Image: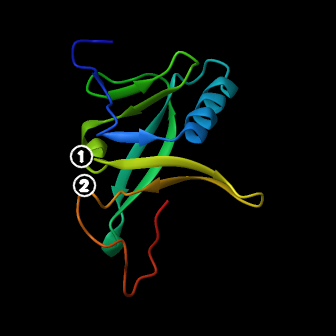
Amino acid sequence: MSEFDQLLRDEDLQVTQSAREKITGLIQDTKGEAEAVRIYVTGGGCSGMNYGMTFAEKAEVRDSIMQGEDGFKLVVDPVALSFLGGAEVDYVDDGINTTFVFNNVFQSVGGSGACGGCGGGSF
């Protein structure tokens, strides 16, 4: 890691065991093409921000990093991190659908997560 890299702490972002295992598997499935999974945040209109994930070939200098010895590595840039304080990333498999879920995302920025008109949603 470079001098700017920071380790993500539980206060910054929590990742459940099921999410860690799935992220590790996804990284391994890339056969070396991706070093990590990146969490990103985009504007979401009246319902707040949209949270997503993509592969990262490498961590950038200003990224915060969470990693494990088993190949798990998650990176978040400073802007996305400012919207994630106290959030939890979970991976849910209910037998029909499988998805990553971002819980408690409104803790850091306020808001209710509800929208009255546009039908906007979240990840």
Residue 94 image-quadrant placement: bottom right
The correct choice, above or below, for 102 with respect to 47 in the image is: above
Question: Alpha carbon of mark 2 to alpha carbon of mark 1: how far?
Answer: 8 Å
For label 1, the crowd category at 10 Å Cα-Cα, with few meaning under 14, some 14 to 19 and many 20 or more, is few
The correct choice, above or below, for 64 with respect to 70 in the image is: below
Residue 70 location, x and y as percent?
A: 58, 18
Mark 1 residue type: Ser
Q: Nearer the viewer, residue 103 or 54?
A: 103
- Circle 1: element type: helix
Report the side of 46 relative to 94 (left or right): left
Determine contact: label 2, label 1, CB under 8 Å. yes
The correct choice, above or below, for 64 with respect to 102 in the image is: above
Query: Of the residues tagged 2 and 1, which is closer to the observer?
Result: 2
- Residue drawn at x 29%, y 40% is 11
- Residue drawn at x 49%, y 20% is 68
- Circle 2: element type: loop
Residue 123 location, x and y as percent?
A: 50, 59
Query: In the rendered image, which residue does mark 2 sit on?
Result: 108
Mark 2 residue type: Ser
**Chosen colour scheme:** rainbow
Query: In the rendered image, which residue does mark 1 sit on?
Result: 82
Residue 28 location, x and y as percent?
A: 66, 23
